[in-house]
Image: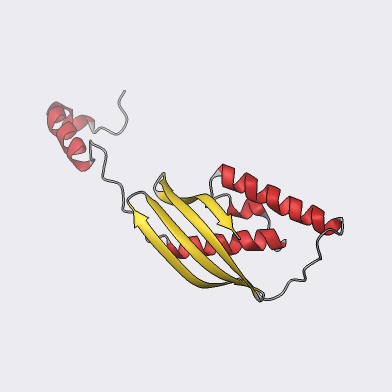
Amino acid sequence: MRIGVDRAGWGDRDEVLDEVAAGRPLGAAEPEPLPDPTAMCCSVVRAAVEVLRGDRGAAQLARWVTPVVLDQLAERARLLHDAVAAGRLPATLRGRPVRVRRVRLERRGDTAEATVVLDDDGRVRAAAVRLEARRGQWRVAVLEIA
């Protein structure tokens, strides 16, 4: 028993199969071009600084960064938190939100590199980011924050 085929037209089986094949692409379709990664890059860098400040959990960035970057960011945030708890670093109060001052991004095929200047509650920070195309979306593969 065949499901989805009208038995009345079964005599024209080749025609039916040709029509079905014509309705679907048989080969791999060209992948959609990746969008401009500038906004995503700025959002991820801002969120990463918020992780380091203790305002956000590192797991919230899992969708936009590689597992290596996520693990290293979580470890750095944990070390900063431990240093504050031990009294080796002063506790910082949550102040103004992190703001992007300037971003410069250069895209080369499936990779992009960016520098981002941030205002972190009166402190200026710089970040360097390398984005790579993975499975049709941008992911942060390298993140350096000064």
**Is 42 placed left or right of 14 in the picture?**
right
Q: Nearer the viewer, residue 52 or 23?
A: 52
* Residue pictured at 59% horizontal, 58% vertical: 145
Residue 89 spot, x, y in % from top left: 80, 61
Q: Nearer the viewer, residue 138 or 1?
A: 138
Q: In the picture shown, does residue 56 fall above or below 68?
A: below
Q: Is residue 104 visible?
A: yes
The part of the image, by quadrant, that contains residue 125 is bottom right
Residue 38 spot, x, y in % from top left: 43, 63
* Residue pictured at 69% horizontal, 51% vertical: 76
* Residue pictured at 21% horizontal, 37% vertical: 20
Residue 66 spot, x, y in % from top left: 53, 45
Residue 107 spot, x, y in % from top left: 36, 57
The part of the image, by quadrant, that contains residue 48 is bottom right
The part of the image, by quadrant, that contains residue 56 is bottom right
Quarter in which the N terminus is drawn: top left
Task: Say how the picture is coloured.
Answer: secondary structure
* Residue pictured at 43% horizontal, 48% vertical: 132
Work out which residue is located at the far top of the displayed protein and give it. 1
